[in-house]
Amino acid sequence: MPKNRMEAFSDGVLAIIITIMVLELHMPDGATFDAIRSIIPTFIAYVLSYIYVGIYWNNHHHLVSTLSRVSGKILWFNLHWLFWMSLLPVATKWLGTYPFKTAPTFVYGFILFMCLISYYLLQIEVLKQHKKNSKLK
């Protein structure tokens, strides 16, 4: 299968993830600078997640650019990674709503860990498609 379909799908999913996260940012309850304090934890969680998504998007772009075609295995590993990425908006909202609480912090960290593991598995599968003398290897 040509790589452009997987790349376009992945870009679309990541764009939706960022859109959902930004829609969870709400206006402060008032027109003063003190009102901003109530949204600071949510904003910090959003910025952190936005950076993570941005790093993954950039790395994914460079990883996929090394391919000429994608296999069924690569598609499934990519979907596995996108599944964990798609949980980031929920975890981000929960962490922002309850900063420094154990369960939201653990779940957020666990989802980030699973994003890392699933992306690592995707990288391994992509590397399998490259020849021994490939620049990527």
Image (cartoon, grey):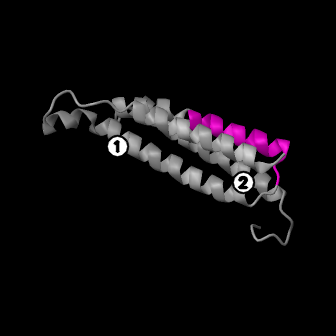
Q: Quadrant of residue 126?
A: bottom right
Query: Is label 1 in a helix, a strand or a loop?
Result: helix
Query: What residue span does the magenta drawing correspond to?
Result: 69-86
Residue type, numbered disc 2: Gln
Q: Is residue 110 visible?
A: no
Residue type, numbered disc 1: Ile
Q: Residue at x 49, y 39 (%)?
A: 18
Magenta stretch contains residue 88: no
Left or right side of 99 for 106: right
Magenta stretch contains residue 81: yes
Q: Is residue 49 visible?
A: yes
Please tell me how crowded label 2 is: few (under 14), some (14-19), or many (20+) other residues with Cα within 10 Å: some
Residue placed most toward the observer, 44 or 110 = 44
Task: Give above or below for 29 relative to 65.
Answer: above
How far across and how far down the image is residue 107, in percent?
A: 50, 33
How far across and how far down the image is residue 9, in percent?
A: 67, 40
Task: Give above or below for 60 relative to 66.
Answer: above
Q: Quadrant of the C terminus?
A: bottom right
Residue placed most toward the observer, 118 or 85 = 85
Left or right side of 2 for 50: left
Q: Residue at x 48, y 29 (%)?
A: 90
Q: To which residue does mark 2 refer?
A: 123
Query: Is label 2 in a helix, a strand or a loop?
Result: helix
Q: To which residue does mark 1 refer?
A: 44
How far across and how far down the image is residue 119, in percent?
A: 66, 48
Seen as rendered, the residue at the extreme top is 29
Please tell me how crowded label 1 is: few (under 14), some (14-19), or many (20+) other residues with Cα within 10 Å: some
Q: Earlier in the sequence, mark 1 or mark 2?
A: 1
Q: Quadrant of the N terminus?
A: top right
Q: Residue at x 77, y 49 (%)?
A: 3
